[in-house]
Image: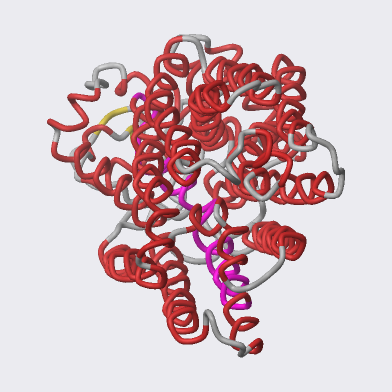
Amino acid sequence: MVRRETHGARQFNYFNLFMVIAMSFGSMTYGYSASIIGTTLGQPSFLAYFALDTRADATSLISTMNGLYQVGGFLGVFTVSYFADKWGRKAAIGVSALTVLISGALLAGSVNVGMFIAFRFFNGAGAFMILSAVPIWMNEVTPPRNRGMLVDIHGAALLFGYMVAAWVGNGFFYLHTAAAWRAPMAFQCLPPLILLFLLPFMPESPRFLLMHDKHEEAASNLLRLHTRDEAESELAQISAQMQIDRTLPCSYWAMLKKPSYRKRTLLCLGTTCGVQMSGILVINNYGATLYAGLGYSPEKQLILLGGWLTLAFGCGVLSLFVVDRLPRPKLIGAGLMGCMVCLIVECALVATYVGGTNKAALSAAVAMFYVYVIFYEIALDGLQFAYIGELFPTHIRAKGMNIGVAGICLMNIIWLQSAPIAFQNITWKFYLCFIIPGSIMAGVIFFTFPDTWGVPLEEVAAMFGDGEEVYIGGEGTGKEVEMAEHREVEGKGEKV
């Protein structure tokens, strides 16, 4: 039986909470960068500047703007493990933030559609790099009992970025100038700029420091981040675990070759790809288009999108108080099934009433998008990053997170590239492309995925049959970790 720390007094101090909130400017960076295209595509000034309201290939160009952003993310995210493992978790976050800052400025200054599309690629690379890098750091600086809640701040902050993007875009919609689209695009440079300013004051991950024999700095950071008892216990366990981890394979090839690592990798991809089968980014990025299909004016489209994202942020905050109260796979599976039920109703309403005069039915179709986002944000968005971060040991955590986020990119390349053409040609039937695989994955995750809720990161290996890789009382063991309670024995980290 694996030890779970899911009850009792909280183990973090307020410095830990403050540091996680400060680092969430990186999460906001991703949220704003990923979402601002949704309102930009609804800006008449943007469409007119690039002639997307008149040119014959407009639909293909819009698809490319979204698709190439995801391609950049898919390729860029694999660089995170290099920076995170060699130079530190903070270095990976810093490089990512700088990439978004520079590409965001060049997007805002684009003078033709080719330049805009090119820098969407680099913007996507930086945004998905930071989406991967931030939860790696968060998972490694938070105590097990509160890890889900604290890492879920990542999800709430990226939702805050979505919301800000919606309302900034909405506000500039009423500025009737040819450059009205540039200011919202340039605003994405502010969160990474703040993060880069704060980054030198952030503590480095104690697990990274111990992996590189920086024992004193790791001890100091743990004492700043946690209560003394928790810090001492963590230091003893992590230090001993690092001695084991250094002897273990850490390449991408090893993650495919070794059965237990391969299982974790498949679970990671199953989680992120399964969550993306909900169709969340299609609804977010093409929100204006979807509301237009329901008969709403451009002004109303942006207001509805802003309201949807505001509700999403509120539910993201609410999820902080839910994630550490239920088993991870049960919550993810139930949330995904809730999203699928909403899409089934949405599909039926669109198939039956779009093009007609039944305003109540069209309002109900909008309402289903709003109910959908409640399920998604409370159960899926932030929790997926906590869960996939918990699946991997320290020496391959960055690579595991990269693979998970690459899965997000890969799924979104498929959905976002095809969505405009699909909605144009097969209309409501496109929802079936989410409903069928999404419902299957909901059941698979709910009933078959292992639960890492409250398990210390150093002990997750025992859940995958790697008990010999787990430190217990200063030595490895082939048995599963079984400790109902533990205490320090003369500072050596022995558990009884």
| Quadrant of the frame with the C terminus | top left
Magenta stretch contains residue 377: yes
Residue 429, image x and y in percent?
A: 35, 71
Q: Is residue 450 left or right of residue 138?
A: left
Locate residue 9: give its quadrant.
bottom right
Q: Is residue 201 visible?
A: yes
Residue closest to the eye, 190 or 347: 347
Residue 255, image x and y in percent?
A: 21, 31
Residue 348, image x and y in percent?
A: 43, 83
Residue displayed at 79% across by 45% down: 168
Residue displayed at 29% across by 28% down: 475
Q: Which residues are magenta?
A: 367-395
Magenta stretch contains residue 298: no
Residue 86, image x and y in percent?
A: 43, 10
Is residue 243 depicted above or below 399 in this figure?
above
Residue displayed at 63% across by 73% down: 295
Look at the magenta stretch and give its main secondary structure: helix
